[in-house]
Amino acid sequence: MNIQVLGAHNCESQNTRLISLLIDDTLAIDAGSLTSSLSLAAQQKLKAILLTHQHYDHIRDIPAIAMNFALHGNGTTVNIYSIPPVYDVLSTHLLNGKLYPKFLEQPQGNPTIKFTIVEPYQTEQIEGYDILPVPVNHTDPTVGFQITSPGGKIVFYTGDTGPGLTECWGHVSPQLLICEVTAPDSYEEFAKKKGHLTPSLLKQELTIFQKLKGYLPPVVVVHMNPRLEKEIEAEIAAVAKALNNSINLGYEGMQLNL
Ligand SMILES: [Zn+2]
Ligand SMILES: [Zn+2]
C-alpha cells in the first residue's frame, strides 16, 4: 500500500495545502488538495473519495473535481463515500445550482457525483479495499477511516478529532496511524473546545491505545497549523521520545509505504 500525503495542513498557502491523502493512486481521503495536487489525468484515476466530515478544508476540491469529470470524464462518475451531513452540506451549500452546478443530481439518470452513505462501524468493500468508518470526537459529525488493502495492509486516518478516542481505538488495529495534531500544547483549551489535538493530548490518546491494544503503530501527524509548526514539531519529538515510538510530521509530497 502506497500512501501519498497531498495536503498536510489546516491552512493553504504557496507551500502548504489542505488535507488530502491518496492511496495507491486510486483511493482518496478528504479533498482539501485533490485538484491542486493532481493532474487532470491523475484525478480521473480516482475510483473513490472518502470524506471524513463537512468542514471546508476537507471537501473543498469536490466541486472542481466534479467539473473535471463532467467535462472530460466520458460519463464516468466521481464516487464519494461519507456520512449524511456531508451530503447535506455539499447539496445545499456548494453544488446547489447557485455556487456551482448540481453535480449530485445532474446529468439526470447518471449524475457526475455518485454519493454513497456509509454507516459507522460497517465495513464497506470499495475497489478491493475494506473501508471501516469509525466516529471520532469533533465539533460536527466526523468519521475516521480504517483502510485494509487487498494484501492485508491496514492504515487508520482519524480525520479531525479532539481527545476521547478510547471507543474509536477499540474498533481499529492499524499498522500505521495517521492522526491530526492541529496546534501546540499552549493551545490546549482551544483544541479541546474545537475538537482538535495537541502533542500532549495525542500522547494521552496514544497511551490509551497502547494499554488497550498492547502495541503502538508508527504515527504520522497531519492538519498542523503552518504558523505553529515549529512548536508542534518540537513537542511531537518529545512525545515520540517519551513513548519510544516513531511519530513524524506529515508534509506535502510525503510517501508512505506499507
Ligand atoms: Zn474539522
Ligand atoms: Zn480540518
Image (spheres, helix red, strand yellow):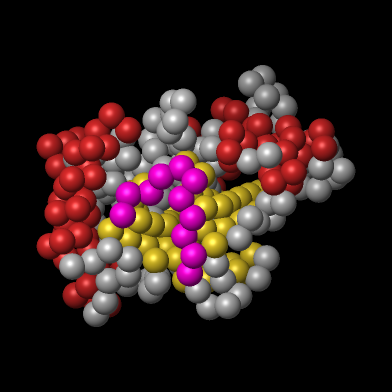
User: Residue at 55% across / 67% down in the picture?
Assistant: 1
Rendered view: 61 above or below 77: above
Nearer to me, 23 or 110: 23
Q: Is residue 102 left or right of residue 107?
A: left
Q: Which residues are magenta?
A: 248-258
Please state the horizontal and vertical placement of residue 129, each as a whole percent of the image.
Answer: 60, 69
Rendered view: 228 above or below 171: above
Nearer to me, 69 or 189: 69
Residue 18 among those drawn in magenta: no
Residue 257 among those drawn in magenta: yes
Task: Tell me which corner region of the image, top left, top right, bottom left or bottom right, holds residue 242.
Answer: bottom left
Please state the horizontal and vertical placement of residue 77, each as a whole percent of the image.
Answer: 76, 47
User: Residue at 58% across / 77% down in the picture?
Assistant: 151
Rendered view: 182 above or below 29: above
Number of dots carrying numbers: 0
Please state the horizontal and vertical placement of residue 40, each as a whole percent of the image.
Answer: 72, 39
User: Residue at 67% across / 19% down in the picture?
Assistant: 98
Q: Is residue 127 visible?
A: yes
Q: Is residue 24 left or right of residue 243?
A: right
